[in-house]
Amino acid sequence: MSGSLNLKQIDAFRWVMISGSTSQAAAILNVSQPAVSRLIHNFEGQVDYQLFIRHGGRLHPTAEAEALFRGIERVYPGLTHLSSLMQNISLADSGLIRVIATMPMVQRLVPEALKAFHEQLPQIQLSVKTIVKRELREWLDGQQFEIGLATLPVDYPAANIIPLASLNCVCVLPPGHRLSEADFVAPTDLANEQFISIIPDTVLRRRVDQVFNELGVERQLNIETQSGAAICDMVAAGLGVSIVEVFTASAFADKGVILKPFRPAIRLQFGMLLPVKRPQSHAVEVLIEALRDRAKGFEESFRNF
């Protein structure tokens, strides 16, 4: 390994591994796709071995990348908290609103709520940090945020949790799928289908597996990935079908992904987490209301799902 690494390179590598593509990593990091590609290229130069094999327009991680990713995941919470601490010292009086959000909620809920917020308070600075669920505990313990967004339940004081939305998961199908005209999709409809699954040890994976196992329905589980966005990208490419939460699925409707109600329903609860023993500023209250209003909009739009 030559030279010194920087957190931007590590962030880019990590989110490409989690999301499965440079385009999704770029969206999460709020940078351009070429910028992510440059960071990955520089990162490969720093570690001095190939991290991805580029084939068919997609990045396929090497064995070295998988091993490096596992190591980074063990130390990443500490790295990000150190970075956050240094930033917070310099921005303590800037009026910055720090938002942490797990991946499902950054797909549509956060961008649409932020748009409404900026129409009211365009001068307020915002920092949005996308995290995976297993990192949430570290952030809640550190209290370095004004608003947290996550799938419930969460081990946190009930007085500091605001329920946002209760939404059924949806079945996502590729364009032209044989079930495109169905009123709803049942597990038996997906028997022997190529099924793209979220990784194990997630709430969604456990709930979906439980439904299929209880009915004795077999699926072809040949692909699994770490994010709903990567799943929807693969569904759009015709690689299979899946079941994901609404925030992510609805963001891919313009790519041809077909959304169908799934029965029996798999319902997920989403909520907002506020810091303990810290008063809210007027700006934070405005953002809370924007998030609540947009979440209600999703509930209305997907009431029949």
Image (cartoon, rainbow, N blue to C red):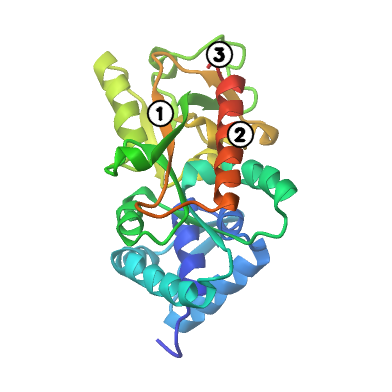
The residue mark sitting in front, 2 or 3, is: 2
Q: Which mark is residue 294?
A: 2
Picture residue at 50% right of the left edge, 73% below the top: 9
> Reading the chain from its start, which is encountered first: label 1 or label 3?
1
The extreme bottom residue here reads 3
* Three-letter amino acid code at the position of disc 1: Leu
Picture residue at 35% right of the left edge, 51% below the top: 276
Query: From mark 1 to mark 2, how far is it between C-alphas?
Result: 17 Å
135 and 206: which one is in front? 135
Query: From mark 2 to mark 3, how far is it between C-alphas?
Result: 17 Å
- SS at badge 1: strand
Q: From where the camera sits, is residue 48 visible? A: no
Picture residue at 36% right of the left edge, 26% below the top: 219
Q: How many residues crowd around disc 2 within 10 Å: few (fewer than 14), some, or many (20 or more)?
A: many
Q: Is residue 183 above or below residue 137?
A: above
- SS at badge 3: loop
> Reading the chain from its start, which is encountered first: label 2 or label 3?
2
Query: From mark 1 to mark 3, how far is it between C-alphas?
Result: 15 Å
* Three-letter amino acid code at the position of disc 2: Arg
Q: Which residue is mark 3?
A: 304
Snapshot quadrant of residue 158: top left
Q: Which mark is residue 268?
A: 1
